[in-house]
Image (tube, rainbow, N blue to C red):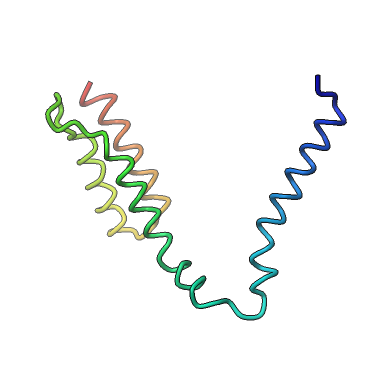
Amino acid sequence: MIDQSHSLIIIAVMAVCTMLLRFLPFILFSKNTPKFVLYLGEVLPYAVIAMLVVYCLKGIDFLGGDHGLPEIISVLFVILLHKWRHNTLLSILGGTICYMLLIQLVFT
């Protein structure tokens, strides 16, 4: 059985490791950041977003009852909302609300 002091030690070790991992890049690259790291900082966000879109849309059943219409409508809504307002948080929130309304009220 784990007592309270053991739990506190585990939490402290995890906190130190997390802080070290977060601060290490700033310590290592404080003077000059390698061009490869700068390149990754530019392209990685787009790659992650593309991967998330593929992951979210991989289960669409085009032969099912609604033929993936809630997902397609929500994706188009996110694209239009983002082109209009250029606000990522608003696009995510608007797309989520659109999808939830569609699957709860329209495509039941």
Determine whether 30 is above or below 89 in the image.
below
**Residue 42 figure quarter:** bottom left
Query: Which residue in the rendered view is the most extreme toward the left?
Result: 63
Determine whether 23 is above or below 66 in the image.
below
Residue 22 at what x, y percent from top left? 66, 57
Relative to 95, 12 lies left or right: right
Q: Which residue is nearer to you in this view: 86 or 13? A: 13
Identify the residue at image location x=29%, y=24%.
Answer: 104
Residue 73 at what x, y percent from top left? 20, 41
Query: Which residue in the rendered view is the most extreme toward the bottom?
Result: 32
Determine whether 90 is above or below 23 in the image.
above
Relative to 13, 104 lies left or right: left
Determine whether 54 is above or below 65 in the image.
below
Q: Which residue is nearer to you in this view: 77 or 57? A: 57
Q: Quadrant of the C terminus?
A: top left
Residue 7 at what x, y percent from top left? 80, 31
Identify the residue at image location x=15%, y=28%.
Answer: 66
